């Protein structure tokens, strides 16, 4: 039943299509200390069908990414003394990524002043759908009302710890009331919320809500959330509405995780293995 829902929503792929048909995604992420996160997101996005994927990051992150995924387009940003992106450098180059279909921001950026300024600039200036994760969420933990500056309904993907920081609620409170917490936050800040845990809740500001109860310890590893964000951002860039992109992305990520766990022990599953299994999931959805 869940797979049938995804089949009806995922973008159609005409044989005569070109790369522009399937959208342009810009990933704003990465830092000296977290070079792999944005690479995982970009690779997951490409494996999920986006036509063009651009990585906006520091030279050190780009150097690591180009050898792994030469299909990515790169926009270098100067780094600050912490090895994170310089806000001044980013703002000076924003015009180069203005035409993106969707923008994913926050993964691996580190929690610092420049990150806060970059996220604020993205929220205030981009016309495209935004997907905000990780340090992008940490940067607004004291002022989540910044989400209201987004030109379109954004998608946020907090795990329960990040949601705790955003809401000032304890993790136990959130876990006891997952659906209500996600729905209330979505309505208050006009965003789609993907509340991540072993049980994931997807909620919209209009009151739509679905709980994905498919526990899999194979996904309990650093980098899994970056893969999920990449899938959701890819579907968004291909034209899905924010709630549909979040819902389909969460289900596809879960299916790929289950596929990886069926091949190897759950202890051994890596986020990159989940990316590898995306192809089989999409083939099944297209059948």
Image: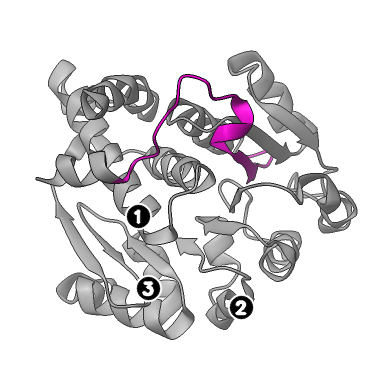
Give how far across and how far down residue 284 sits, in percent.
21, 24
Residue 146 disc label = 2
Which element type, helix, strand or loop, lies under badge 3? helix
Residues in magenta, as a range = 9-33
Dividing the image into 4 quarters, which one contains the C terminus?
A: top left
Residue drawn at (34%, 40%) of the image: 10
The disc, 3 or 1, on the residue closer to the chain's N-terminal end is 3
Give how far across and how far down residue 27 sits, in percent.
62, 43
Residue drawn at (49%, 48%) of the image: 239
Give how far across and how far down residue 238 sits, in percent.
50, 42
Residue 141 belongs to the span the image colors magenta: no
Horizontal placement of 150 versus 176: left or right?
Answer: right
Which element type, helix, strand or loop, lies under badge 2? helix
Horizontal placement of 126 versus 137: left or right?
Answer: right
Per the image, the residue denoted by label 1 is 244
Looking at the rendered structure, the number of numbered marks drawn on it comes to 3
- Protein image colouring: one colour
Marks 1 and 2, how far apart at CA: 23 Å
Horizontal placement of 53 versus 11: left or right?
Answer: right
- Identify whether 125 is placed above or below 25: below
Instruction: Classify mark 1: residues with Cα within 10 Å, few (<14), some (14-19) or many (20+).
Output: many
Per the image, the residue denoted by label 3 is 164
Residue 229 disc label = none
Give how far across and how far down residue 18 sits, in percent.
59, 24
Marks 3 and 1, how far apart at CA: 25 Å
């Amino acid at each position: 039943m869940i797979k049938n829902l995804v089949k009806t929503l995922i973008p159609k792929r005409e044989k005569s299509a070109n790369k522009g048909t399937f959208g342009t995604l810009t990933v704003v992420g990465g830092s000296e200390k977290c070079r792999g996160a944005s690479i995982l997101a970009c690779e997951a996005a490409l494996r999920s069908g986006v036509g063009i994927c651009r990585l906006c990051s520091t030279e050190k992150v780009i150097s690591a990414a180009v050898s792994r995924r030469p299909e990515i387009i790169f926009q270098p940003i100067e780094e600050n003394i912490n090895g994170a992106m310089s806000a001044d450098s980013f703002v000076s180059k924003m015009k180069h990524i203005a035409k993106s279909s969707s923008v994913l921001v926050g993964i691996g950026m580190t929690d610092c002043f420049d990150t806060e300024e970059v996220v604020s600039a993205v929220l205030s200036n981009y016309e495209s759908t935004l997907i905000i994760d990780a340090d992008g969420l940490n940067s607004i933990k004291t002022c989540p009302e910044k989400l209201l500056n987004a030109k379109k309904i954004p998608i946020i993907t907090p795990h329960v710890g990040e949601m705790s920081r955003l809401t000032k609620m304890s993790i136990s409170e959130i876990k006891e009331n997952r659906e209500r917490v996600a729905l209330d936050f979505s309505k208050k800040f006009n965003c789609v919320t993907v509340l991540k845990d072993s049980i994931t809740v997807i909620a919209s500001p209009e009151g739509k809500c679905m709980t994905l109860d498919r526990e899999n310890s194979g996904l309990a590893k650093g980098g899994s959330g970056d893969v999920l964000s990449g899938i959701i951002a890819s579907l968004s860039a291909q034209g899905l509405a924010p709630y549909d992109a979040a819902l389909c992305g969460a289900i596809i990520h879960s299916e790929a995780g289950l596929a990886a766990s069926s091949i190897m022990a759950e202890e051994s599953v890596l986020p990159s293995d989940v990316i590898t299994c995306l192809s089989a999931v999409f083939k099944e959805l297209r059948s």
